[in-house]
Amino acid sequence: MDLLPGDVCQAVREDIDYKDLRKDHKDLNWLMAHQVLPLPPRAEERDVRRGPFLPGPRLLGLAGVAASPLQALRPVPFQLLPDSCSWLHPPPCKEQLCDTSDFCWPQRWHRRGAIPAGHNKWSKVKNIKGPRDAKRSQIFQKLSMMLRFAVREGGPDPELNSNLANIIEQCRNNNMPKASIEMAIKGVDKEKSTTYVLYTARGPGGSALVIEILTDNTRRTQQEIRLLLSRNGAVITDGVRHLFDQKGVVTVSRKDQEQRSVSLEQALELAVEAGAEDVQESEDEEEQEVLKFLCDVSVLHQVRKKLDAQGLQSLSAGLEFIPNTTVELSEEEMKQASELLMVLGNCQDVIRIYDNIQ
């Protein structure tokens, strides 16, 4: 029985048993590619119990023959062809073409190319804005803790409490809302008592850490800090405190009051005139370049006033632990130390971390 392509369409339309047709036209892929076979039935004519495009009583897909009624309820797997082809079907095998009288109609699909990242606003929000907002919220939370602690130690008046005045200035430099600052100061009486704790630790590669903490539960915080340190190759110890000196630090912008850049050489000359001991280049929380003027704790506010009088823009003034000796780490130790500082910084009770890593 020799059938031409037109006869194939007629045979299918009349539901003729086409075993002989398969013998003469085994290459169903050719028939599909040339659209010799008729279109699949409309959606309303399909039996949903047999799949989206299976008219026969028994599930036969080009991917395999069903052996039971339960298998007839399973979807037929298809392959995704290249972009140049719009038909989805796996190649038939010889047994599937010759051992059944039911036929699976092909389904026509169109493939759309992948949309690159950054195609809409949300992709930028979740990849950029989300992490920044999370970090920003964490900074605000820690500043609120510092405000409450400063109020308990020296009162709510910034003019009489220099520590509170410095923290309020830090809040403003970090763009903390004024309402949040006032709420933290006024809500001190309603909060649990906060305790200041200082931990020292030995980190990867013999590095030293000083960890400042404000907590309302010292036992819980100590257990959490010990766990974080042990998981990242560090341990709490009392033998590294002498590696740090507590100094007064005035943080200054790299641009003066007239928006002119300030070099390190100029800063060193101004430091001598203001009574500071040294100047260090650093970065703030927003990764903006700043200059840190180091001085004795007793002359901190005098140094700041003189630096402002010299035309510099002071951003904050406070006490910090400055390492008097540094250590150099290998690449692997540096990676481990970075992970340690990251997990400690994410701890809710940790407000500042100092290290002597070069």
Image: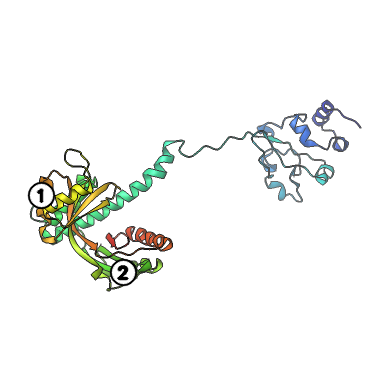
How is the structure coloured here? rainbow
C-alpha separation, residue under disc 2 versus residue under disc 1: 36 Å
- The numbered disc on residue 165 is none
Would you say 143 lies left or right of 336 here? Answer: left
Cβ atoms under marks 2 and 1 closer than 8 Å: no
Q: Nearer the viewer, residue 257 or 352?
A: 257
Question: Of all residues shown, which one is farthest toward the right?
Answer: 1
Q: Position of residue 307 (x, y in %)?
A: 13, 48
Q: Quadrant of residue 193?
A: bottom left
Dot 2 or dot 1: first in sequence order is: 2
Would you say 121 lies left or right of 313 here? Answer: right
- Name the residue located 76 percent from the left edge and 36 percent from the top edge: 29
Q: Which residue is mark 2?
A: 201
Indicate the amino acid at tag 2: Ala
Q: Nearer the viewer, residue 330 or 14?
A: 330
Q: Would you say residue 189 is visible in this rendering?
A: no
- Name the residue located 22 percent from the left edge and 41 percent from the top edge: 261
Instruction: Label 2, secondary structure: give it.
Output: strand
Q: Position of residue 213 (x, y in %)?
A: 25, 63
Viewer-nearest of discs 2 and 1: 1
Q: Position of residue 64 (x, y in %)?
A: 75, 47
Would you say 263 lies left or right of 345 here? Answer: left
Instruction: Label 1, secondary structure: give it.
Output: helix
Q: Which residue is mark 1?
A: 306
Tag count: 2
- In the rendered image, the vertical position of residue 29 relative to residue 341, given as above or below: above
Indicate the amino acid at tag 1: Lys
- In the rendered image, the vertical position of residue 58 relative to residue 329, given as above or below: above
Quadrant of the rendering where the N terminus is positioned: top right
